[in-house]
Image: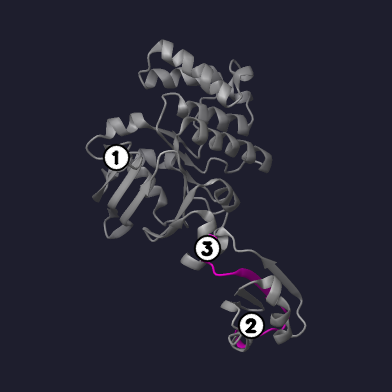
Amino acid sequence: MAMISIRDLTKRFGTLVAVDSLDLDIEEGEVFGLLGPNGAGKTTTISMLNTMRRPTSGSATVNGFDVVTQPAKVRKSIGVVFQEPSVDDLLTGKENLELHGRLYGMDPQLAKRRIKEVLELVELTDRKDDWVRTYSGGMRRRLELARGLMHHPRVLFLDEPTLGLDPQTREHIWKYISKLAREEKITMIVTTHYMEEADALCDRIAIIDHGKIVVSGAPAKLKRLVGGDVVKIRKRGLDACKLSARLKGLGFVKKIECENHELSLTVQDAHENLQKLLAKMGPVDAVEVHEASLNDVFFKYTGRKYREDSAEGGWGERMAQSSVSR
């Protein structure tokens, strides 16, 4: 049985269809990435799965519990790491975890043992008695991961878990996420605007646009769907759209995009065919060649580039609004 099962899940806000008849299964222990442009419906989807919003129609289960008829059991099954900082600066790391245990009604002895375990897991044992206001940004994120794990959740939702962190800290956070999925068999649902993270660390990815999943699968499989390598060519004074007609007869050119003085081509085996391509064009100012990436997949299926600086407000911002939609 899938850890998360979604069937025909729909959410409307008046005439706006934010999530449109979604179907999806996520297995135990998967690290699953949910990607999409602003307003695509990914945040609304997550909000329904963690019971913050009530679906208009359709169904979803988390750990076998229905999100509409069994919300309390769903909430006991999940942990959430919000995009916005949510630990208390006026408490120590240990006190934050103790408070979380009390809010979840954990047995005091179990909570004590669990605090020790999760602090060791995220390597904060030595700082457990320090005020959180003295923690670095990466340490706070690790504490939030520890807090989300306190009550042994089966599913952990992570909203932009590394947004705003430096590259080294981002790498460390993802190391913990991968370790958790592997060692504790926790199912992870992640949103991120860092495509290289999703590529390297997610078992599967779904790209959602206009409330629908437009494509899903393992990152390597999705990149193969692009159909080749990506070649970008720039030349001053180039009429890219006019020149593209000349290139259409080349069998190894699978797709052509033109904009101003730049051509973006999908080329089969670019390392073998690049010279043939350039021979058709004459002198150029710049050539860029790279293997297909998730950014290319995203552009192929949505017609938009995935901007790292376009992160939506996190789920925490919507908590106060959730009652309006119920």
What residue span does the magenta drawing correspond to? 223-242
Q: Residues within 10 Å of mark 3 (few under 14, many from 20)?
A: many
Q: Position of residue 186 (x, y in %)?
A: 45, 34
> Disc 1 and disc 3: Cα gap in Å?
36 Å
Q: Nearer the viewer, mark 2 or mark 3?
A: 3
Q: Position of residue 322 (x, y in %)?
A: 32, 41
Instruction: Indicate which disc residue 240 carries.
Output: 2
**Quadrant of the rendered image containing residue 121:** top right
Label tally: 3
- Give me the residue at 29% from left, 37% from top: 64
The amino acid type, in three-letter code, at marker 3 is: Val
> Which residue, given by chain and number where applicable, does mark 3 sit on?
297
Q: Position of residue 325 (x, y in %)?
A: 28, 45
**Contact between labelled residues 3 and 1, with CB atoms less than 8 Å apart:** no
Residue 278 drawn above or below residue 174: below
**Is 230 in the magenta?**
yes
Residue 59 drawn above or below residue 37: above
> Which residue, given by chain and number where applicable, does mark 1 sit on?
323
